[in-house]
Image: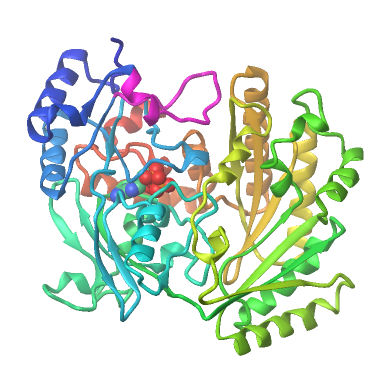
């Protein structure tokens, strides 16, 4: 059996650490064979070079066992990579940045600890998936819905910690994760915000703290292991009103984003606002072979036919309104009036009313997983990678970004799936590339495209908000104000809170001292 060891640790020391772990959490929760570790690899990684290979995977069953795991890791200098469910495939799944790191799988801590039906809060452990929470709410007839991502195999908690975005009024998930319990690398347990007061009924209601607010410090970081958190739900609406529009021209994106941003600022829109080009629908269809015989980009001369066949415009947009029908209709009318200044295209409207069967759609609080088919667009052995810089929601900036992105996709010969997610005061431009993992040349092209997109965005001051394991370091380096002073603060913090450097080395480009030199 060949084991991938963490840097600086020999086989004997590693085996000793594994035995110590097994004696605390049980042999069956310490996985070391190649076969057992398959689910903990980067499922969408390029074939060559093989990276992010876990040394082992361990799974404590509760907070006490987790404390024992951290103690042993500190004693043996064993690096750990915490995951909740490890299903964020586009970013590396369950795999660690540094090969040899042991995946700390929190999936067994899977309890829904409390549902506050008065204030709309679920307190969950890391292993609770979106499907778990949905089934619980349904089974218990609790009149609340949980915001859901496009594919919902992942965990409610892990997704929010990574700034995941989703459907519904609470779709800005990081801002709807309120009140955490965190185990520090030392094994000490803390509660953030009002939870720092023993017995406070407001732990999961007030998002700040008395004094500094630490919650954000545990998001996209390697400073602690989150063991539970409060998630705000939204009340089952009386109605979901959906208005959908297809816009025929590539150039429609500029006015569309600017108009939506203004509507957003006026409080007219609710929930996630996501517009994408026709490739979003086409890429999950599994029909690529009908338009192309090889893995090169589908010729642009075919676009018109493809859009016609799927009855799509260049850009498609669904807006959902949640609540009382009168309010929904008033909001939809304001949007339609604004849009009529820019386009003659009309909205299609449909609605769901409480009591009717729910559509199988995350916009209606029902989890699905089929959008994962996107990964198989080019080949059954496929993968996908997203590049998502943050921009101001301004017409020119968005138009130019889309046109530069598309030119780069063309240059490297990839089909272009482009989309824009609108936040409160920003736009997130999603550039999605799908590839065949077993095609080494395609892997090299995908890597070159990603790096060019990153450099192009950086030259204009646009940075990524989240990234795949392979690019965490590179993206961190684009944040270079004052010689990278924020990064220096992160690493100073890392050494202070995790002096033995055991938690998630390299996460978001943050390394503890003992591995920092090796990476330079
Ligand atoms: P998903 O919920 O989509 O399955 P993961 O469990 O893979 O996502 O979590 C995504 C990332 O978030 C992990 O790689 C890890 O860096 C971080 N993370 C997830 N859960 C925790 C946790 N409980 N404590 C600290 N960090 C976490």
Q: Write down the region rendered in magenta.
A: 35-55
Based on the displayed image, in which of its 4 quarters is residue 360 positioned? bottom right
Q: Is residue 102 above or below residue 279?
A: above
Residue sitting farthest toward the left: 23
For residue 214, say whether it is visible: no
Across and down, in percent, residue 178 comes to: 33, 68
Residue sitting farthest toward the front: 356
Q: Is residue 400 above or below residue 291?
A: below
Color scheme of the displayed model? rainbow
Q: Look at the image and say whether residue 48 sits in the magenta stretch.
A: yes
Q: Is residue 347 above or below residue 404?
A: below
The answer to whether residue 123 is left or right of residue 454 is left
Q: Quadrant of the N terminus?
A: top left
Is 276 in front, or is 180?
A: 276
Is 96 in front, or is 83?
A: 83
Q: Main secondary structure of the magenta part?
A: loop
Across and down, in percent, residue 6 comes to: 29, 23
The answer to whether residue 67 is left or right of residue 380 is left
The answer to whether residue 336 is left or right of residue 11 is right
Across and down, in percent, residue 466 comes to: 50, 49
Identify which residue is drawn at 63% across, 36% down: 450
The answer to whether residue 346 is left or right of residue 95 is right
Identify which residue is drawn at 78% across, 57% down: 315
Based on the displayed image, in which of its 4 quarters is residue 70 positioned? top left
Across and down, in percent, residue 380 comes to: 61, 27
For residue 414, say whether it is visible: yes
Picture mark count: 0
Based on the displayed image, in which of its 4 quarters is residue 219 positioned? bottom left
Identify which residue is drawn at 60% across, 50% down: 388
Is 64 in front, or is 73?
A: 64
Q: Quadrant of the C terminus?
A: top left
Q: Look at the image and say whether residue 474 sits in the magenta stretch.
A: no
């Amino acid at each position: 059996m060949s084991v991938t060891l963490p840097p600086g640790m020999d086989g004997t020391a590693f085996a000793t650490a594994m035995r110590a772990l097994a004696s605390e959490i049980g042999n069956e929760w310490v996985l070391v064979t190649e076969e057992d570790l398959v689910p903990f690899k980067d499922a969408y990684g390029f074939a060559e070079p093989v990276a992010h290979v876990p040394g082992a995977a361990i799974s404590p069953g509760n907070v006490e066992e987790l404390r024992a795991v951290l103690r042993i890791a500190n004693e043996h200098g064993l690096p750990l990579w915490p995951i909740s469910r490890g299903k964020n495939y586009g970013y590396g799944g369950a795999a660690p940045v540094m090969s040899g790191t042991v995946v700390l799988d929190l999936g067994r801590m899977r309890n829904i600890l409390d549902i506050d039906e008065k204030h709309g809060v679920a307190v969950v452990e890391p292993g609770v998936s979106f499907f778990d929470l949905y089934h619980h709410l349904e089974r218990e007839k609790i009149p609340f819905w949980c915001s859901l991502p496009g594919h919902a195999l992942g965990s409610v908690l892990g997704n929010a910690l990574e700034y995941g975005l989703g459907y519904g009024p609470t779709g800005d998930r990081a801002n709807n994760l309120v009140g955490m319990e965190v185990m520090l690398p030392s094994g000490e347990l803390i509660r953030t915000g009002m939870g720092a007061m023993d017995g406070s009924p407001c732990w999961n209601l007030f998002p700040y703290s008395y004094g500094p607010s630490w919650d954000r410090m545990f998001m996209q970081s390697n400073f602690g292991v989150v063991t539970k958190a409060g998630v705000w739900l939204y009340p089952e609406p009386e109605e979901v009103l959906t208005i959908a529009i297809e816009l025929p021209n590539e150039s429609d994106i500029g006015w569309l984003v600017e108009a939506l941003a203004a509507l957003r600022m006026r409080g007219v829109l609710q929930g996630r606002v996501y517009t994408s080009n026709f490739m979003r629908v086409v890429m999950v269809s599994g029909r690529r072979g009908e338009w192309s015989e090889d893995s090169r980009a589908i010729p642009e001369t075919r676009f018109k036919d493809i859009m016609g066949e799927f009855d799509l415009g260049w850009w498609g947009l669904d807006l959902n309104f949640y609540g009382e029908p009168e309010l929904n209709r008033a909001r939809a009318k304001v949007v339609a009036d604004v849009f009529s200044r820019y386009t003659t295209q009309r909205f299609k409207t449909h609605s769901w009313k409480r009591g009717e069967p729910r559509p199988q759609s995350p916009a209606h609080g029902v989890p699905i997983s089929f959008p994962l088919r996107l990964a198989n667009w080019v080949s059954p052995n496929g993968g996908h990678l997203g590049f998502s810089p943050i921009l101001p929601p301004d017409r020119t900036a968005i138009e130019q970004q889309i046109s530069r992105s598309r030119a780069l996709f063309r240059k490297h010969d990839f089909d272009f799936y482009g989309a824009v997610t609108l936040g409160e005061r920003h736009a997130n431009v999603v550039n999605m590339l799908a590839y065949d993992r077993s095609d080494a040349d395609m892997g090299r092209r995908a890597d070159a495209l990603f790096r060019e997109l990153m450099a192009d965005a950086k030259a204009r001051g646009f940075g990524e908000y989240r990234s795949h394991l392979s690019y965490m370091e590179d993206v961190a380096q684009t944040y270079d104000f004052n010689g990278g002073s924020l990064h220096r603060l992160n690493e100073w913090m890392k050494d202070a809170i995790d002096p033995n450097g055991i938690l998630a080395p390299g996460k978001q480009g943050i390394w503890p001292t003992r591995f920092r030199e090796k990476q330079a």
